[in-house]
Each structure stands twice: as C-alpha cells, then as structure tokens.
C-alpha cells in the first residue's frame, strides 16, 4: 500500500513535469529491474542514463524533478566545478541551464565515472577528472569497502596500489584550467568536506561565488563545523533546498 501511494505520487509528478515522456520513464523504472534505464526529453541535449533500483533514480528526482540545484542569480555562470559528480546528473543539469559555462566534473569511482562520461559525451566544454577531491594532492582509499558505489567514504593513505584513488585539490583544478573564479562550486563528497574546509581553502574560497553543498555529519563528525568555520571568515547568505545548503559568498 505504501509503495502504491508512493508510485502514484511519482507518476503524477513525472507527468506534470515531463509530460508523456515522464510516464514512459516512470514505467521503465518499474519494469526494467536492475537494468540501465534511459530518460529522453527534447528539453535536454542528450539522453540521461541511470542504474535502475539504485540511488541514481532518487538523485535524478532531486535534480531534474524537484530541481534542488535551481538557483536564482543575476549573472550568467562561466565556471562550474562539480565535486562528487557521480554519474553526471548535476553536470548535465547545469549544462542545460547554463550552456556556455565551462564545467569541471570530478568523480573517483570507476563505474560512476564511466556512466558520467556517457551522460555528458554530447555536451561541449565539460571536463571530467577521475579523482577524488581533497584539500591537497594525495592518495585516498575507500574505508567502507562493500558499500554501494554512490555512498563510499575515503581516507588519506600513504600506500599506492590498484585500489588507491588519486586525489586532486581545488587549487590544482584552478591552476590546471587557468580559472580566475568559480561561479558555482557543487560539493557532494560523502564527508570529505570536513577535510576540504579544514585546510588550504584560503586561496580558492575567496574566488568562489556560490557553494552548493550537502553536509554529511552522520558520516564524518565535524563536517558542518569545518564548513561553517571556514565560511565565517567571509560575508555570505544561505538558503536550504532539499538536502543542500546554497551559500552565496559576497
């Protein structure tokens, strides 16, 4: 009964937002089991591929159905950095909303990264990096082995092996892509925001206009404290949308 009510609500919302193409996609999510499902809509430049019966569907709903990354701003973003890009849904959303923006998408997990590339291959000026985000150049390892590939957490390690994840800092990204500013910085990195905002943020944070972040204190204690301590050095305003904080830095 609970699932019936939930599916009825999703059906209505998909139809209201996407019309008959939304109904087709909704039916695919019910019938395709664990297969890849594809969402087609003329509003978007290319199809969107998702792993059915996974958090991909929930993330799709958050981003495209409920538009939790929608922001009302009085300028056109030129540079967007997507930290924790997963399968590229946020990058695709921003590229359709701001087609002239340069987007840099960072995702460490290999299967996520493969679908990320599939989801953005027809967009111009999106650059993908198969690395983790950290406060400095480093090597990372997954500490909750066996967790789903969309919810793993990482720790820094001195070892280098086939399971090691290379990490890149935001300062490195700025240098590598010759960025003068970051207009939108989206961060969803499963607790690593704690380390990101504890050290080495003094150069890139003043160059950032908007931060969209999901904080994960339930995964890494102190993540929120590190974030707000770093931002306390600057003037900013904030709104909450869904699971995200959207911070406008003056």
Image: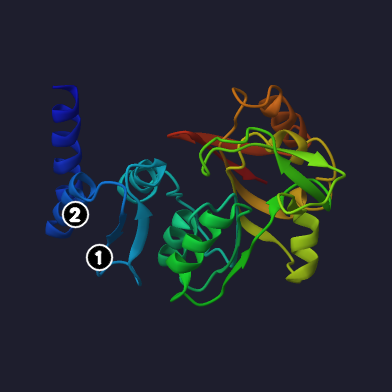
Q: Dot 1: few (<14), some (14–19), or many (≥20) neighbours within 10 Å?
A: some
Give residue 244's position: percent from left, percent from top: 51, 37
Is the C-beta separation of discs 1 and 2 under 8 Å? yes
Binning the other alpha carbons within 10 Å of mark 2 as few (below 14), some (14 to 19) or many (20 upward) gives many
Count of number-bearing discs: 2
Q: Please give left or right for residue 127 compared with residue 35 in the image.
A: right
Q: Nearer the viewer, residue 66 or 117?
A: 117
Q: Secondary structure at mark 1?
A: loop
In the rendered image, residue 11, in percent from the top left (x then y), is placed at 15, 42
116 or 98, nearer to the observer: 116
What label sits on residue 41 in the rendered view?
1
Q: Secondary structure beneath disc 2?
A: helix
Q: Is residue 231 left or right of residue 39?
A: right
Residue placed at 80% from the left, 60% from the top? Answer: 172
Quadrant in which residue 198 is drawn = top right
Find residue 22 and name its label: 2
């Amino acid at each position: 009964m609970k699932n019936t009510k939930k599916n009825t609500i999703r059906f209505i919302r998909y139809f209201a937002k996407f019309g008959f193409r939304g109904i087709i996609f909704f039916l695919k999510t019910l019938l395709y089991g664990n297969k890849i499902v594809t969402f087609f809509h003329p509003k978007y430049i290319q199809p969107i591929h998702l792993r059915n019966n996974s958090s991909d569907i929930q993330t799709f709903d958050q981003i495209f159905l409920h538009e939790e990354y929608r922001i009302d701003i009085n300028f056109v973003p030129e540079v967007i950095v997507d930290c924790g890009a997963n399968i590229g849904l946020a990058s695709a959303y921003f590229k359709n909303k701001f087609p002239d923006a340069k987007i840099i998408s960072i995702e460490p997990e290999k299967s996520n990264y493969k679908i990320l590339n599939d989801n953005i291959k027809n967009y111009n000026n999106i650059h993908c990096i198969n690395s983790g985000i950290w406060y400095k150049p480093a090597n990372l390892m997954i500490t909750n082995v066996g967790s789903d590939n969309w919810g793993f957490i990482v720790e820094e390690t001195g070892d280098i092996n086939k399971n090691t994840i290379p990490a890149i800092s935001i300062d490195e990204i700025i240098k590598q892509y010759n960025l003068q500013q970051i207009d939108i910085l989206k961060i969803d990195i499963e607790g690593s925001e704690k380390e990101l905002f504890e050290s080495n943020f003094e150069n890139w944070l003043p160059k950032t206009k908007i931060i969209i972040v999901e904080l994960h204190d339930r995964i890494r204690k102190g993540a929120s404290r590190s974030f707000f301590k770093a931002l306390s050095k600057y003037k900013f305003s904030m709104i909450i949308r869904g699971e995200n904080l959207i911070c406008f830095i003056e």
